[in-house]
Amino acid sequence: MAEPLPPAPTAPLTRGRRTAVWALITIASVLGLLVILATWVNRQMFDNGTWNKASAQLIQDPSVQTALSTYLVTSLYDNVDVPAALAQRLPPGLKPLAVPAAAALRQPATDGVKLLLTRPRVQKLWIETNALTHQRLIAVLENKTRDGIDTGNGKVTIDLGALLASIGPQLGLPAAAVAKIPPNTGVITVMRSDQLGIVQKAVKAVKAVSVWVFVLVLILFAAALYLAVGERRRTLRNIGWAFILLGLLVLVVRRFGGNYAVDSLTTTQYRHPAHQVWEIYTSELRDLGWATILYGAFGVLGAVLAGPTHIATQARRHIAPVLNDNQGIAWAAVAFAYLLLILWGGTHALRTPLGILVLGALLAVGVVALRRQTLVEFPSTVAIEPVPPPPPPVGVASS
């Protein structure tokens, strides 16, 4: 096989053009951070499957079960005369013991409610309650009225009244006492009507950023590559590193920013379950961060593979015969590897039709660019067989 041909000389980038390329990469990276945050909010807030999955994870978390059981028992004691309810079930001579008995039963009651929260029937009730809250929330945020969904004049709440009513009989309270629980007991306000206008505008901004600003980011990166004539491989490598740093920044913000926010806004009693809630509801943000790092790593590896290092040159030398002269085999191998990535589905883009098409198109562009390079570097990849001399004419003796 022939030695690789030296690359054609190219004029170096002017100082102004190089500055423009770096400016485009920097602006695209800053906007990319906004896109990642907006995409996380969009998926977590507006996707029913993601919301219900998070609700299921919440109710299955032991620390959340502990905090929720404490809240429910406290609400029950605050709204029901538990000593009077217990006195109704005690003999006349033991009625004076109702007050200390009620106090003594508080912690066992909390433990009992926590045990109830581990049961599938109670967990299903929790998930259904949160699903209804999500429907109300979306109806309010999108300024829509859905059939059977009461938005409460812009006030969205999580109503744990059904859970509260179901644990009363489990604690031995009479049905008459449980029936006297005020209707608003166990109701957690998610959003008030006076917050409606601001939140609706924020929702519109989130949707716009997650779509149109994402398109703008892609255009800015493409413009940087277009301007970097003669240094496009290095520019692709720099864009890959920008993706990696952006993903790392998202993971750092999620970890330390979440810790700071939770520690500042919660008391010591609820700090651990609040951290668990943050972990669950920011799992999509974590996945976005790792996906961004993965895409950046592929960009860097592609740039390195096309680079002048000895290892990269030897790698291109080995794949050149197949890539240059057996395109069918090369494309079949690439398609098979990409199919394995789709089956793995490690990122959100690999689980959506549009994401699969976009990533597939980028992969195809990379393969075409690599083939053009190997055709220039290793043009003689097929050995030329010597042509045998023609046979002598019939009747003519060969000397």
Image (cartoon, helix red, strand yellow):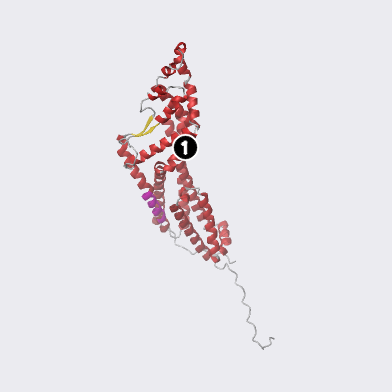
Where are the magenta residues, as a range?
A: 211-222
**In the visual, does 243 lie left or right of 399?**
left
Q: Mark 1 points at which residue?
A: 56
**In the visual, does 320 lie left or right of 143?**
right
Is 327 located above or below residue 114 in the figure? below
Q: In which quarter of the image is the C terminus?
A: bottom right
Disc 1 residue crowd, few under 14, some 14–19, many 20+, Cα 10 Å: some
Q: Quadrant of the N terminus?
A: bottom right
- Tell which residue pokes out farthest to the top in this image: 93
- Tell which residue pokes out farthest to the bottom in this image: 395
Please state which of residues 241 and 76 is positioned toward the viewer in this rendering: 76
Please state which of residues 147 and 103 is positioned toward the viewer in this rendering: 147
Is 66 located above or below residue 83 in the figure? below
Q: Residue at x 43, y 53 (%)?
A: 354
Assign the magenta stretch its main secondary structure. Answer: helix
Dot 1 lies on which element?
A: helix
So how many labels did they put on this image?
1
Q: Where is residue 388 in the image (x, y as percent from the top left)?
A: 63, 78
Q: Is residue 220 magenta?
A: yes
**In the visual, does 12 lie left or right of 377?**
left
**Quadrant in the rendering for residue 271:** top left
Q: Does the magenta stretch include residue 169?
A: no
Q: Position of residue 240 (x, y in %)?
A: 47, 51
The amino acid type, in three-letter code, at marker 1 is: Ala
